[in-house]
Image (tube, rainbow, N blue to C red):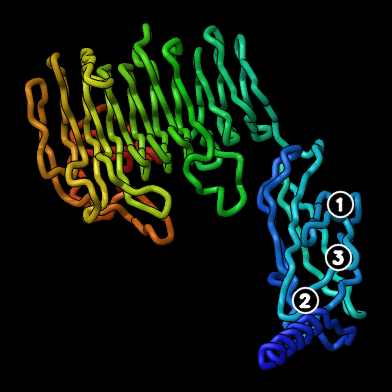
Amino acid sequence: MWLRNLSVLVAFVLFLFSCRKESFTTNAAALLRTSVDSLHFDTVFTTTGSTSQYFKIVNDNNKGIHLSSVRLAGGAASPFKINVDGIVGPQVSSAEVLANDSLYVYVTVSINPTAQNLPFIIRDSIEIDYNGNKKWVQLDAFGQNAHFFRNRKITGTEVWNNDLPYVILGSLTVDTTATLSINKGCKVYMHADAPFIVNGSLQVNGEKYDSTRVVFSGDRLDDPYRTFPASYPGLIFTASSKNNAINYGIIKNAYQAVVVAGASASIPKLALNETIIDNAYDIGLLGLNTSINARNVLISNCGKNLFLAGGGVYDFKHCTVASFSNDYIQHKDPVLVLTNYTTQGNVVTANSLTASFTNCIFWGEQNGFVKDEAFVDAKNLTPSIAFNKVLWRVQNTPSFSGLTINGGINQNPLFDSVNTAERYYSFRLKGSSPAINAGINANVSLDLDGKPRPVGAPDLGAYEKQ
């Protein structure tokens, strides 16, 4: 008997519960709220669309509320699109928000190409209509027209000027007999699957001001993706490429920012001048038995900052190579790895190696995994490696035949600002830095900012304290 009564009681409780869940109110005093009052979309390149954002319609009442409609004020002509709890707009009718519950409204924006060269703002709003009430969520997008290249191969001679940004989809390849010149102020944005492959020659002609540097980055400019490493594969200079130069460039947020492979009839194969390489997930600058000249180069906060393996010819002057762990990249490898060999399985392949590092800084966080920020090694063949007036963090100073060190400072360089929580870094020098006036004349008259260096005793690293 008691089992029968228990089953009746359970059924009655379930009935009451189900009635409560299905109870709705039409009282205008029962208000809804939204998780945000507005949604902002950062730069969206025309024709490529954007990522989705969302907000919630929240019902804090003890009864459910029927929504008469959720609609875009701009209707079907709006560049924005909505999806309300799985139903696609521009208008969704008869949605429900249950008691003490919420539903999601997803919003995307797709901007059509225009003749405008400058960024422009697109706006719309979403109206939520229920129980005689109306609530609004504002929308805006910062859109920009651009040059779009999908799986593009450049042949002959081509020049890019700063009239519009350049967006690379698929890949971009500079053919073996081609030369691409990218002039001051150009911004090159690459999709996640878009490597920039140079089989011929690349000439980057930036200038010292922020607005006139040439920037390579990923094409996701919305938060939080704008600062993600590994946003695109990177710049790849293949064995056939030659006569490459990057002047006043910024290469950031790549997987492997710059890869240079193979010897070249022209030495150097790549000249890097007054250039920043930052936030590469795997490697900032990778050289494989090749030739690179670098002057006033900053390589910062990469998985492996500067990795030169398998021999080659290298000349680095006034470079700062530094790394600090952040939420995306742990600093677990030396900021400089230099060898004359590569190893595959148990097979070691060695080549000749000539390398010079003058007035450079190699540094990483002091409480991290890495004790020696410079790993230098050679096998089978005697290299010619010179460190002239460098500041580096090492517990075990490299020492072997063919290596010379002229004045190594093992002290904190005292960078101007290192704030890993805010991900803000300034690798300029504080006035008390031991790197100030610690260098030798390397015939470098300017620093990374394009500001003058003294003839006598310049500062170490990419920046001269002014």
- Give me the disc on residue 70: 3
Q: Dividing the image into 4 quarters, which one contains the N terminus?
A: bottom right
Give me the residue at 58% from left, 34% from top.
Answer: 190
- In screen coordinates, is 88 left or right of 368? right
Mark 3 vs mark 2, CA separation in Å: 16 Å
Upstream in sequence: badge 2 or badge 1? 1
- In screen coordinates, is 173 left or right of 51? left
Q: Is residue 129 above or below residue 392?
A: below
Amino acid of disc 1: Ser
Q: Position of residue 110 (x, y in %)?
A: 77, 45
Q: Is residue 108 above or below residue 310?
A: below
Give me the residue at 16% from left, 30% from top.
Answer: 387
- In screen coordinates, is 51 left or right of 115? left
Mark 2 vs mark 1, CA separation in Å: 29 Å
Q: Nearer the viewer, residue 390 or 194?
A: 194
Residue 199 visible to an observer of this rendering: yes
Upstream in sequence: badge 3 or badge 1? 3
Q: Nearer the viewer, residue 441 or 211?
A: 211
Please tell me how crowded label 2 is: few (under 14), some (14-19), or many (20+) other residues with Cα within 10 Å: many
Q: Position of residue 269 (x, y in %)?
A: 38, 16
Q: Position of residue 17 (x, y in %)?
A: 75, 84
